[in-house]
Image (tube, grey):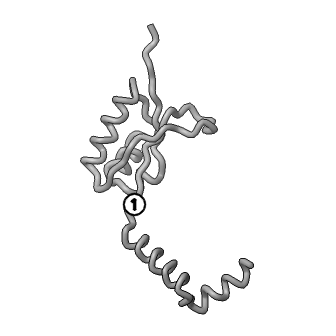
C-alpha cells in the first residue's frame, strides 16, 4: 500500500520572516515531504514557536509546475506602514497632495 505524501516548498517570505525557517532551509533545503497535510501544519506551528514570526501552510497554486502540494509562507505585519499609507490616502482625499504626488498624477491621466 503506497504511503501518502505531502510536499511543501518553503517560500522566501517564510525564510525572511522567521529565523528558524531560514536556518532549516540552509541545513536541509527548501523542499520538505510529509505523510499528510496535518503533519505539515504541525511542523509549521513548531517553526512559528521557534522563530520570531508566524509561518503557515498555504495550498500550492494549481498552475505551479513543481510537485508541491503546499507552500510554507510568512508575512510581515506592517501596522505602521499601513497607517502611513492610510494617512497619505486621507491627505489626498482632502486635497492636500504633495508636489511629488501631483507630478505623478500628471503621468497617470
In the rendering, at what x and y percent does residue 35 appear? 39, 23
Q: Secondary structure at mark 1?
A: loop
Quadrant placement of the C terminus: bottom right
In the rendering, at what x and y percent does residue 25 appear? 41, 45
In the rendering, at what x and y percent does residue 59 appear? 49, 37
Residue at (36, 48) in percent of width and height: 55
Residue at (44, 19) in percent of width and height: 4
Q: Nearer the viewer, residue 20 or 99?
A: 99
How crowded pointer 1 is (Cα within 10 Å; few <14, some 14-19, many 20+) is rated as few
Residue at (49, 80) in percent of width and height: 90
Q: From what the image shows, is residue 74 above or below residue 71?
A: below
Residue 53 figure quarter: bottom left
Q: From what the image shows, is residue 68 above or below residue 76?
A: above
Q: Is residue 92 left or right of residue 10?
A: right
Q: Residue lying furthest left in this view? A: 49
Which residue lies under the disc numbered 1?
76
Q: Is residue 26 left or right of residue 43?
A: right
Q: Residue lying furthest top in this view? A: 1
Q: Nearer the viewer, residue 91 or 98?
A: 91
Residue 32 figure quarter: top left
Q: Is residue 92 left or right of residue 54?
A: right
Residue at (55, 83) in percent of width and height: 92
Quadrant placement of the N terminus: top left
Q: Nearer the viewer, residue 76 or 102?
A: 102
Q: Nearer the viewer, residue 25 or 9?
A: 9
In the rendering, at what x and y percent does residue 56 appear? 38, 44
How many numbered dots are placed on residues in this image? 1
Q: Residue lying furthest bottom in this view? A: 99
Amino acid at each position: 500500500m503506497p504511503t501518502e505524501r505531502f510536499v511543501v516548498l518553503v517560500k522566501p517570505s517564510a525564510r525572511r520572516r522567521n529565523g528558524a525557517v531560514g536556518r532549516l532551509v540552509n541545513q536541509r533545503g527548501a523542499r520538505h515531504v510529509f505523510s499528510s497535510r496535518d503533519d505539515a501544519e504541525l511542523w509549521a506551528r513548531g517553526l512559528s514557536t521557534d522563530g520570531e514570526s508566524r509561518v503557515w501552510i498555504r495550498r500550492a497554486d494549481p498552475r505551479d509546475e513543481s510537485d508541491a502540494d503546499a507552500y510554507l509562507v510568512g508575512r510581515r505585519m506592517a501596522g505602521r506602514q499601513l497607517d502611513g499609507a492610510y494617512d497619505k490616502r486621507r491627505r489626498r482625499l482632502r486635497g492636500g497632495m504633495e508636489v511629488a504626488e501631483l507630478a505623478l498624477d500628471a503621468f497617470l491621466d
